[in-house]
Amino acid sequence: MVPPVSSPSKQKTSKDSRIMSLHRSSRSLILSLALLLATSGAGAQLLQVPPVGSTIGELGKVGSSVLDGLERPLGQLPLDPRGLADLRLRRLNELVRAHRDLLEMTRSGPAVRGEIVAVDPEPSAVQAAVAAGFASLGEERIEGLDLRIVRLSTPRGMSVDDAIGRLRRITPGAEFIADHLHLPSGSALTATAAAPTLAGGSSSQPLIGIIDGGVAAHPAIGKVEQHGFAQGAPRPSAHGTAVASLAAGENGMQSAAPGAPLLVADVYGDDPKGGNAVAIARALGLMAQRGVRAVNMSIVGPANPLVAKAVAQVRARGIAVVAPVGNDGPAAPPSYPASYPGVISVTGVDGRDRPLIEAGAALHLDFAAPGADIAAASIDGRLRGVRGTSFASPLVAGRLARISLPALEAEARDLGPKGSDHRYGKGLVCGACRTPLPKK
């Protein structure tokens, strides 16, 4: 996937800053690897790291979601920083090949095949598109947000990228975009029809919003209201269940906001097109309508103008939006939504407060939180180990649901060089939120 296109001057500045950041991150990664491998037994531990961004021990329980086939063991973490990004790209290509009739690979990543989204278009722009051979699939106002979209189908045989280029030539100034897919940060969301969905709604005002997969019934998770924004949603998922338990779990969980009411938007279900930009915008509209205090989005995708506008409108209502930097390594392109302006971006640390070697990069970094050597709720009703920046993010979102951002900055424990830095941001949040790994 490639970064979004900007003006030449901004592009050069952004490129230079990313190169400098990559150089620093790569140097830190090499030093970290050297230290790890020099420690007795650390080499074996490093090479047997669990699947990034997934729950341990739940591989093979694959449902029929868009993420089928993506969750598989990394085996060995590539020592080359670009190895993780290359691995991610191979998995995305596999995803598209498995669903050729519904998905296609664009210049920025997987997207819904044959569909274009016009964001707040003038009627004349839509008319021009229809006259050029595009068909209107319907107009929609995103509930809870001041956003209007028109979905268009591309002419037969035309790729999404080519279609967008053609539309921009026909109607300069109009915003036509791909309906990009966003995936849980670093790995697949595992679903199983055997896991019971957490039933019932919450009568309490939800404090924390979660845009992810569905949440399974679990002793550690109580007050949850779930809504579906994809085919088959809400559907229990390993990823969504773990994230929910880290944000507000209790009864044996060391979470960020024990017992806090949750509002969950399942944007995956069993939909091959799950996690698309339109579904995410609708989910953000729900969060705005219900007035949650913080929204956790443990997902990663390319820059997308529709999602960017939805995030900006949610933030304008005083709702904190929190997202992880991803697990594709420092060589990967900046991750979104973490890189959107004002989004609280989060990286992960292990049990010794070392940055995860697989942690990705965003255009800014705000905080670090535990993302390894911790346990979270599993869809089988137990607690299992998890790893990835996906699981650091809800710890920050949970704290922001309880306290203000300035208070969180004061609470964060400074690590690394004094002050904010590119490895820990403003410091470690919720360092005590570490549910011990279950004994074997």
Image (cartoon, rainbow, N blue to C red):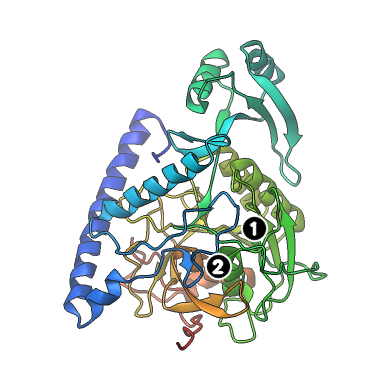
Q: Write down the residue under mark 2.
A: 394
What residue appears at the point 57 percent right and 68 percent down from the top-left corner? 243
Secondary structure type for disc 1: loop
Q: Nearer the viewer, residue 101 or 237?
A: 101
Query: Would residue 342 be seen by someone viewing this image from the given angle?
Result: no
Secondary structure type for disc 2: helix
21 left or right, relative to 397? left
Location of the N terminus (image quadrant): top left
Where does the image place residue 287, in percent across and percent down from the top left? 70, 55
Q: Nearer the viewer, residue 417 or 227?
A: 227
Q: Earlier in the sequence, mark 2 or mark 1?
A: 1
Q: Please identify the residue farthest to the right as the structure is shown.
A: 203
Q: Write down the residue under mark 1.
A: 319
132 left or right, relative to 72? right
Q: Residues within 10 Å of mark 1 (few under 14, many from 20)?
A: many
Determine the CA span between mark 2 and mark 1.
15 Å
Location of the C terminus (image quadrant): bottom left
Instruction: Give, as a three-letter code, the residue at label 2.
Output: Pro
Q: Which of the 4 image quarters holds residue 421?
A: bottom left
Q: Which of the 4 image quarters holds residue 148?
A: top right
Instruction: Give, as a three-letter code, the residue at label 1.
Output: Ile
Q: Residues within 10 Å of mark 2 (few under 14, many from 20)?
A: many
What residue appears at the point 73 percent right and 41 percent down from the top-left corner? 142
Where does the image place residue 368, in percent across and percent down from the top left? 42, 68
Q: Which of the 4 image quarters holds residue 167?
A: top right
What residue appears at the point 24 percent right and 63 percent down from the top-left corner? 28
